[in-house]
Image (spheres, rainbow, N blue to C red):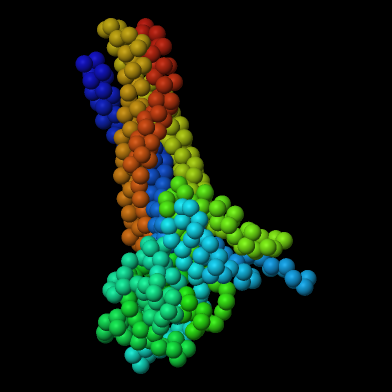
Amino acid sequence: MRILATLRLALRALRRNKMRSVLTMLGIIIGVGSVIAAVSITTGATKQVEDKVASLGQNVISVFSGSFTGGGMRGGWGSSPTLTVDDALAIALVPGVEAVSPEVRDRNQILANGLNWNTQVMGESPDYPQIRNWNMASGSMFAEADVRSVAKVAVIGRTVADQLFPDSDPVGQTLRIRDIPFKIVGVLEAKGFNLFGQDQDDTVVIPYTSHMKRVSRRTFVNSILVQASSPEAITKVQQAITDTLTPRHRSVEPDFTVRTQLELAQAMTATAKVMSILLGAIASVSLIVGGIGIMNIMLVSVTERTREIGIRMAVGARGGDILVQFLVEAVTLSLIGGLIGIGLGMGASRIVSALTDWPTLTPVWWIVVASLSSGLVGIFSGFYPAWKASQLDPIEALRYE
């Protein structure tokens, strides 16, 4: 009951000076609002990056051609073709490997339905949709039998379907790649743009054997896509792939590179996390300024209410009661300012999202942290003025004019 009475006294004192109370809370409001807005924007950006990385596939490991050295010339990874289909078949036998797709790619002008379109033509295995976590919108993926028979079949992305078959179902129709007819057996679901700004739907996927023997006439593959059986197995599978390919590629320097999806995700989200910490730290300065403002106003309030303190002590209030009263006032100011700041910060992030089409996300635990932080600021800022008030001499306080 004493706590409730103290809270009522504190609220009554704050209501007596509404404008001063609002101005005192302003620093806390700006500080907490800035923190919530900054965290919402950067967390939304991080989540978007993570979703984009996830759209590349589940538990994916990519094997790229490596560097080369010859005739005094040197090049980095991917500068010289070194991977073969046999490498992919060897990787498929590695424990923990769920699916494998040798990957061959180039750009070609394709023709269909009296229209033409320049797009990326991918040579893949039937495991490609599983590795990339890519469902079929219609039709089906080509089979392993099509790979073995070097079949002229194709699966197309949504962009290609819209460009070449705007008014009809592409499944069952024919498109031509380098004047070679390919029957369309399926259409992939729309995926949109990837992390690098490329339209993932602007693609034609054919069996890698058909690409190598009919379209590009090459013996090496650009890369090998691998899916590990679980996220926990990725690191072990990555090392096993390296151990498998090293004796097969008898080169002085490694001529292949193994990269995981986790490495890509960490690299892409690192910047967003740094920005989140930086913006949060800058916004936290406003909390410190707000705390200083609360301390100053509470010191002024102690001076103004010296006679009131003396009267309370004269009728039996103890120093602890006075300390609690002023501390409650400071914490109440800070908490109310914090709650208003949280609301304004979330509102500001939604406005930014609506105006710039930038995703925002406010983690619940950050709201809890902001609330606790504002409360702690009130305690630290209000303790000294409250202690000073509790130490006043009742007689001197009654004499104060």
Above or below, comparing residue 166 to residue 220 in the picture = below
Q: What residue sits 38% from the left and 63% below the top?
A: 130
- Farthest residue, direction bottom: 114
Task: Determine whether, in the image, residue 101 is placed left or right of residue 329.
Answer: right
| Picture coordinates of residue 392, whole percent (x, y) | 40, 11
- Farthest residue, direction left: 1
Above or below, comparing residue 332 to residue 229 in the picture = above
Dividing the image into 4 quarters, which one contains the C terminus? top left
Q: What residue sits 44% from the left and 50% below the top?
A: 231
Q: What residue sits 57% from the left and 70% below the top?
A: 84
Q: What residue sits 46% from the left and 31% below the top?
A: 292
Task: Determine whether, in the image, residue 1 is placed left or right of residue 47.
Answer: left
Dividing the image into 4 quarters, which one contains the N terminus? top left
Closer to the camera in the image, 334 or 326: 334
Closer to the camera in the image, 303 or 210: 210
Is residue 185 visible in the rendered structure shown here? yes
| Picture coordinates of residue 340, whole percent (x, y) | 31, 41
Above or below, comparing residue 287 to residue 79 in the picture = above
Closer to the camera in the image, 322 or 172: 172
Q: How many marks?
A: 0
Is residue 41 visible in the rendered structure shown here? no
Above or below, comparing residue 240 to residue 164 in the picture = above
